[in-house]
Image (tube, rainbow, N blue to C red):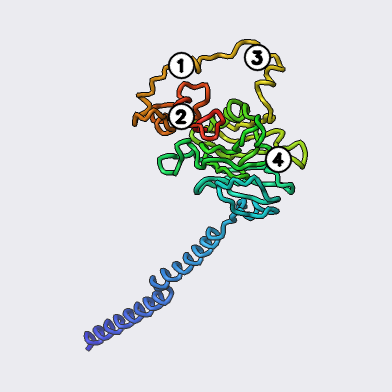
Amino acid sequence: MKKKMNYLILLLTTIFMVGCTNVEDASITDGKTDPEEVTTADANNNSEKEEDTTKVVDEPVVKKTPTETNDDLFSGYKHIEVDGGDLSGDRESDVVVDIGYGDREYWAFTNEYGQLVRVIAEEIILQNDSNEPVLSSGRYYSDEAKVPGVESDVLDEGHIIADSLGGVSNAYNITPQESTLNRHGDQAYMENGIRSAGEATNFEAIITYPNTETQIPSSYQYTYTLIGNEIADTFDNVNPDEVNESLGLTDSEPSDSTSSNTNGDISSVDTNGNGQVTIKEAKAAGFSMPITSDHWLYPYMRDNDGDGMVGE
């Protein structure tokens, strides 16, 4: 009897201990957070932080640099179109005209008196006789606009931007220019420099006049960029030889080295053997333009406008 009682007491003690253990496990379990819940909460917090960061990155301060449009450029001027070969010497007042051949944009401006006072071009693009209809004279057109003043024996129909540089021949690109200046002086020197460089940028010409009644300029000012160098040149519309003589700079006899070349053998230049040398033939033979009247090739070429230069 006593032995059975001991077994009963041992059984009750075991049951009691097991019950306490279950209660303790339940208490511990209730005090913990589900791992999945922790992960979700942390992800939500991280997402909110990322959104805050993204908002800051997506809202940069952008400064816009204003660019000059044609509307700004033409403000105060009437934009008109004039045929590049128009021989009329008349100009309208306060207008702007594109004087670039083909797709070139060379803008010419007149003042209230119809005087050509400014010409600009972002880029000077040389004439290309391989894909443009260039005449055998090296020009786009057979003649130039008859601006009042060009009837003078000492004044040429001077281009502000020459044919060889892609300029047209109407009155918005022509001024009466002293012939020596145009053919052999600063004007010719400037054009040769641009041709040799192959292009020019930021081109601007400012033309001034002695009064409001004439179309004959008193001076020219050219600024442009050539192979990274900014060029500025100002010269009067006068005969440079006479100016040099008055300054005592022409005491020595002029050199005739160019004209002394009387080779006369044009067989290597005149490829078709017709006795006449064209601009294309001269260029192909390595001669640079223009060919002036003191060059040995000149007698074999056609100077349609009689200005002493071919291919200017």
Check disc 1 and report its element: helix, strand or loop.
Answer: loop
* C-beta proximity under 8 Å, tags 2 and 4: no
In the image, which disc is placed on residue 250? 3
In the image, which disc is placed on residue 261? 1
Packing grade of label 4 (10 A; few <14, some 14-19, many >=20) is many
For discs 4 and 3, the disc positioned in front in the rendered view:
4
Marks 4 and 3, the one that precedes in the sequence: 4
For discs 3 and 1, the disc positioned in front in the rendered view:
1
User: Could you tell me if residue 63 is visible in this image?
Assistant: no
Q: Is residue 246 left or right of residue 184?
A: right
Residue at 70 percent across and 33 percent down: it is 219
Packing grade of label 2 (10 A; few <14, some 14-19, many >=20) is many
* Amino acid type at image mark 4: Gln
In the figure, 263 relative to 91: above or below?
above
* Amino acid type at image mark 1: Asn
User: Could you tell me if residue 300 is visible in this image?
Assistant: yes
* Amino acid type at image mark 3: Thr
Check disc 3 and report its element: helix, strand or loop.
Answer: loop
Marks 1 and 2, the one that precedes in the sequence: 1
Query: Which residue is label 4 attached to?
Result: 215
